[in-house]
Amino acid sequence: MTPDSQPRMRNVLVADDEPHIGRIIQLKLEQGPYHVTLVPDGRAALEHLRSQEPIDVVLLDIMMPYASGLEVLQELRGLPHRRDTPVIILTAKGQESDRAQALEMGATDFFTKPFSPKKLLARVDELF
């Protein structure tokens, strides 16, 4: 990359039913080369994931209405065009069993709330 070239915009899908947390994540990621689509529940996340829109990384809360983050993760891993999409789980459920289950289901990483938005941005940056 040349010094004056801009990094490619990456598309991030954030699914979190807590609007203030979703907004904080969105504001932090949009400081970098990220375009964020924020959805309030698992059903909306699945609609985006089933589509052909470009999504480079997915951030999922576990406890959401209509479909949990783990249900969304399970379906996402079954979609041929999303099978390898990185997924970071964000949750207030910080038990080791939750972490183990998410990683076993194919999550790329797991952050327990409250988390540092700066560390989350750094982790997303690492993926690319």
Image (cartoon, grey):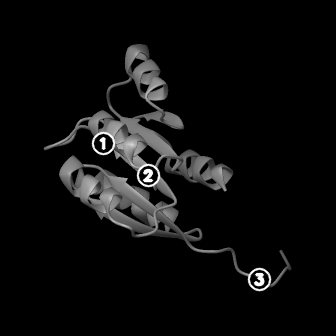
Q: Residues within 10 Å of mark 2 (few under 14, many from 20)?
A: many
Question: Which residue does the image show at 64% across and 74% down from the upper left?
Answer: 8
Residue in the image at 85% along x and 79% along y: 3
SS type, badge 3: loop
Query: Residue 95, how many percent across, how many down?
Result: 38, 17
**Quadrant assignment for the N terminus:** bottom right
| Label 2: element kind | strand
Furthest toward the bottom, the residue is 4
- For disc 3, the marked residue is 5
- 77 or 44, nearer to the observer: 77
Mark 2–mark 1 contact, CB under 8 Å? yes
Q: Which mark is residue 72?
A: 1
| First in sequence: mark 2 vs mark 1 | 2
Q: Is residue 65 left or right of residue 91?
A: left
Q: Closer to the observer: label 1 or label 3?
A: 1
Q: Residues within 10 Å of mark 3 (few under 14, many from 20)?
A: few
Query: Crowdedness of circle 1 by 10 Å Cα count: few (<14), some, many (20+)?
Result: many
- Marks 1,3: beta carbons within 8 A: no
In what element is the residue under mark 1?
helix
Callout 2, which amino acid? Val
Q: Which residue is most to the left? A: 66
**Distance from label 2 to label 3 (Cα)?**
26 Å
Q: Nearer the viewer, mark 2 or mark 1?
A: 1
Image x and y of residue 31, in percent: 54, 69
Q: Name the one closer to the observer, 48 or 28.
A: 48
Q: Is residue 33 above or below residue 95?
A: below
In the rendered structure, which disc, 1 or 3, sits on the residue that comes first in sequence? 3
Disc 1 residue type?
Val
The one nearer the camera, 97 or 106, is: 106
Judged left or right of residue 93, residue 3 is right
Picture coordinates of residue 13, whole percent (x, y): 39, 59
The label on residue 58 is 2
